[in-house]
Amino acid sequence: IIPILMKYETSGYHKSLPLTIPLFAFCGIAEPNSFINSAKKLDLKVEGRKFFHDHQEYTEAVIQKLSEQIRANSISHVVTTEKDMVKLPESFFEEFEVYVIKVDVVFENELIIKDIIQPLLLN
């Protein structure tokens, strides 16, 4: 698994250069520690964090509390997952610089994986 840092912009999101600024990390996934480990692999300077339940709905009240927590840490840049980023309202993107940790899966031996999967697809 290879984490890639992406920056969200109105035109979509694109690979980001390494960051040295403080970030607030948040996510609503089953294994939040894997998200934090990805942030560590990317040498991100996580200075605040919030973990939600898996499949968190980002209601207005949830966004308001999250935004207050980010502001309380004097941070204007956040990092989250692709899964969570698509649930955020436009107002959140207007207030904070949003980064996403995208995860690419790379197999050491792709041929073995193909040999396992291909018969299953043909049935």
Image (spheres, helix red, strand yellow):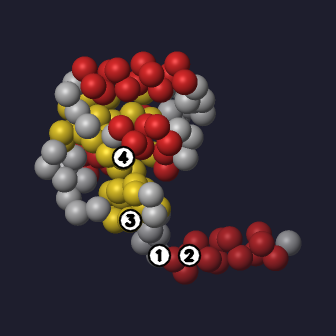
Which residue is drawn at the image coordinates 46% and 37% (left, top)?
Answer: 91
* Residue that carries the numbered disc 1 in the rendered image: 109
Q: Mark 2 or mark 4, which has the lower sequence index?
A: 4
Q: Mark 4 or mark 1, which has the lower sequence index?
A: 4
Where residue 47 sits: x, y (%)?
A: 20, 32
- How far apart are labels 1 and 2 at the CA level? 6 Å
Which residue is drawn at the image coordinates 25% and 51% (left, top)?
Answer: 41
Residue density around tag 1, few if under 14, some if 14–19, many if 20 or more, within 10 Å: few
- Judge whether 117 appears above or below 25 on screen: below
* Residue that carries the numbered disc 4 in the rendered image: 98
- How far apart are labels 4 and 1 at the CA level? 34 Å
Disc 3 vs disc 2: which is toward the camera? Answer: 3
Disc 4 vs disc 1: which is toward the camera? Answer: 4
- Judge whether 28 appears above or below 35 on screen: above
Q: The residue under label 2 is which amino acid type?
A: Ile
The answer to whether 44 appears left or right of 62 in the picture is left
Mark 3 and mark 2 residues within 8 Å of each other at the beta carbon? no
Residue density around tag 4, few if under 14, some if 14–19, many if 20 or more, within 10 Å: many
Q: The residue under label 1 is which amino acid type?
A: Asn
Q: The residue under label 4 is which amino acid type?
A: Val
Where residue 87 sits: x, y (%)?
A: 56, 40
- How far apart are labels 3 and 2 at the CA level? 32 Å
Residue density around tag 3, few if under 14, some if 14–19, many if 20 or more, within 10 Å: some
Q: What element carries label 4?
A: strand
- Residue 112, numbered circle: 2
Mark 1 and mark 2 residues within 8 Å of each other at the beta carbon? yes
Say if residue 34 shows up in the picture: no
- Judge whether 53 appears above or below 88 on screen: above
* Residue that carries the numbered disc 3 in the rendered image: 14
Mark 2 and mark 4 residues within 8 Å of each other at the beta carbon? no
Where residue 80 sits: x, y (%)?
A: 40, 42
Q: Mark 1 or mark 3, which has the lower sequence index?
A: 3
